[in-house]
Image (spheres, rainbow, N blue to C red):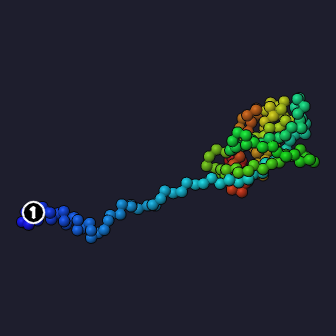
Amino acid sequence: MNLMMRRRWWPAVTALAVLIANGCYDFHLEGPEDPPPVPTTRYVDVTVEYRQPNGCENSLGRCSDNVVFFGSWMRRGGEFFLKPDPNTHVWTGKAIGVPVNFPPSDQPYLVRIYDPHLFDAPTEGFTAERLRVGGQIITRFDRPGGPSESGLVYVDDNGVGHNPF
C-alpha cells in the first residue's frame, strides 16, 4: 500500500481500535432501569350499622321490608341488605372488599341506606342519618334532606371510617 491509501484508512482504523479497546457503550443513563411499580389498591371489609327510627312513616304497609345499604364504590347491584337486631331498631352488615381511600387523596365515598320506614318522608326512604360506617358516625352529608341524600366517608386500612375534615 502506498502512503496515500494508508492516510485514508488511518482515521477509520483508529476509531475502530478505540471502540474495541473501550468495549461497547452503555446507553443506560443514571436512574432506575424499570418504571416505578403502579400502586395497588388495598381492600378491607367494613362494618355498617344503622339505627332505624321507632315510627314507620310508610303509608304502603311495607314497614317490615329490609334496610338496604349503598356505597359509591359499589357497582350497580352490589348493594346489600342489613340484618336487624331482634331486640333493637339497629340493623348491621358488612361491606366486603371496600377500596381504601384514607388518607384522603381523592373524593370521599358517598354512603346511604334505603329504609322502608321513611318511604313517605321527604327523602323517599333514602338517608345517611343515624348511619355508622367502620365505626364512624356519619356527620357530613351531600344533598341533605332529599332523595339524593348521602353521607361522606373515607375508609382506612383497618376498615375504620373517617369523616371528611
Toward the bottom, the furthest residue is: 21
Q: Image quarter for residue 6?
A: bottom left
Residue at x 88% of width, y 33% of height: 62
Front residue of 86 and 5: 5
What element does badge 1 sit on? helix
Relative image position of residue 146 (x, y in whole percent): 76, 32
Q: Image quarter for residue 111?
A: top right
Please give the residue where the numbered disc 1 appears in the rendered image: 5
Q: Quadrant of the N terminus?
A: bottom left
Packing grade of label 1 (10 A; few <14, some 14-19, many >=20) is few
Q: In this picture, is 47 found above or below 58?
A: below
Toward the front, the furthest residue is: 1
Front residue of 51 and 34: 34
Residue 129 visible (yes or no)? no
Looking at the rendered structure, the kind of residue marked 1 is Met
Residue at x 45% of width, y 60% of height: 33
Q: In this picture, is 76 found above or below 17?
A: above
